[in-house]
Each structure stands twice: as C-alpha cells, then as structure tokens.
Image (spheres, coloured by chain):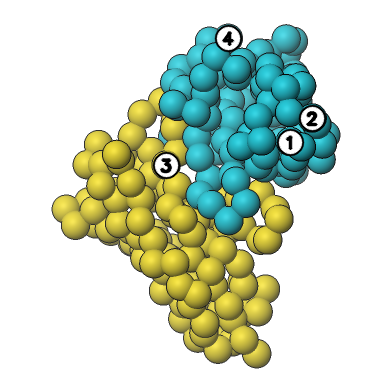
Chain colours: A cyan, B yellow
Amino acid sequence: EPEVTQTPSHQVTQMGQEVILRCVPISNHLYFYWYRQILGQKVEFLVSFYNNEISEKSEIFDDQFSVERPDGSNFTLKIRSTKLEDSAMYFCASEPAGGRETQYFGPGTRLLVL
Amino acid sequence: QKEVEQNSGPLSVPEGAIASLNCTYSDRGSQSFFWYRQYSGKSPELIMSIYSNGDKEDGRFTAQLNKASQYVSLLIRDSQPSDSATYLCAGSASYGKLTFGQGTILTVHP
C-alpha cells in the first residue's frame, strides 16, 4: 500500500541554523500539507500546497518557513533560521484528487533545536 | 478562533466494551470531519471520514455527525487493547486545512 515517506526521522540542529525536511507524498496525490505537533500539544496546520502554489498558510508559517516541490516526487519544508520553539514533530500529508480532504500522514520528522 | 474540542479523558474501558469519543466544533463552515488514531510518538492514522449528518459504519467503528449541534462522535465496538491510543477529531472548512482537537486518550484494559 502506498505511503507518505519523510526524511530524516530525527534532526538535531543549533538555533539559527537552516533545516530542510523532506517528504515524498503518495504518487498521484495532488494536494500536500505540512503540520507540526509540539510535544503534548495539538496537531497544528502549517501550510497547504497545490499546483505548485501555496493554497493556505497559518500564522505559524511566517517568513522563516518556505515550501517547495522541486521535482515530481519531493515536497520540502525549509526553516531558514531555527528557534528553540520550532522543536516539534513535523508531519507531511498528501491527499488525492477528489479526496475531500482525506489526508494521509507520513511518519514525521522529530526536530530538536538546541 | 475556530476550534475543535474533545473530552481529553483519559477514557478507560474494559476489553469488549463500547468506547464513545466525542468532539464539538465551532466553525459552522466545516464540511468534512475525520477521526485519526495516534499511537505515542507516531503519526496520525486515518480511521474514518464523515461528511453528512447521520451515522457511518466501518467494521467496529461508527462515526456520527450532527451539524445542527456541531457534534461529531466515534463509537468503537468490541474494544481491544490494541485500540489503546489517542484519538484525534479533525474538521475541514477550506482548502483541505484540517483543524485538530487536542485528542482523547483511550485505554482498553484486559
């Protein structure tokens, strides 16, 4: 069964460093998302992406964040200058055409900013 | 602020019992609702989606939606210890953005 994959599974970085989190959505899915979950808190929407454009972004998704689909398979989230409060689990999700928001989540990347 | 609220529990039921999980939402524009299961340290796993008022059954799971009351529920019949997890309710009103509740911790004890 097709799955969303994410790399790396864990990333430790120093405050102020740039990180890139990578996702390979399910083939033929058209809608892509990033969410994050700070330990013990709710899953929070960051950004949605369709047709090579951002569809919607949350207040969390400020100028330090960017997303890209550099080729036909990868979907990346970049944090330019990490802060301590960026420490969280980051989930990528994808949705098929006509999926009515039925999103399938990847296993996540645990980011720790020191 | 558009919210999804869940009774955080924890909810403890004996094996074989029915577990009832509840969720309310504040955004009347929400059209689609989802139940996800999340094991500790893992990603959300989709269990059910529901879009219309009424009940939707899938195996041991039944989702219920009442848009007039802005209420969504999930019933798990014949609960098993492997059902022990955090259950997340989520709603969507626009562009696929899911708004999640804080989750209900369910423990099924043998």
Tell me how far mark 4 sits from mark 2, CA to CA: 30 Å
- Please tell me how crowded label 2 is: few (under 14), some (14-19), or many (20+) other residues with Cα within 10 Å: some
User: Residue B99 got which mark?
Assistant: 3
Q: Residue at x 44, y 26 (%)?
A: A59
Q: Which mark is residue A1?
A: none
Q: Which mark is residue A113?
A: 1
Marked residue chain, label 1: A
In the image, are marks 4 and 3 on the same chain?
A: no
* Foreground pick, B70 / A15: A15
Q: Label 3: few (<14), some or many (≥20) within 10 Å?
A: many
Tell me the distance, in whole angstroms, between the alpha carbons under discs 4 and 3.
Answer: 23 Å
Q: What percent of the width, then of the height, locates residue B24? A: 30, 57
The residue singled out by tag 2 in the image is A14
Q: CA distance from mark 1 to mark 4?
A: 29 Å
Amino acid type assigned to the residue bearing label 2 in the image: Gln
Q: SS of the residue at dot 1? A: strand
Residue B87 pos. (x, y %): 52, 61
Kind of residue at disc 1:
Val
- Verify CB contact (< 8 Å) between mark 2 and mark 1: yes
Callout 4: chain: A
- Total numbered badges shown on the rendered structure: 4
Q: In the image, A60: left or right of B67? A: right
Circles 4 and 2 on the same subunit = yes
Judging by the rendered image, the residue that carries numbered circle 4 is A52
Which one is closest to the eye, mark 1 or mark 3? 1
Is residue A11 depicted above or below B109 in this figure?
Answer: above
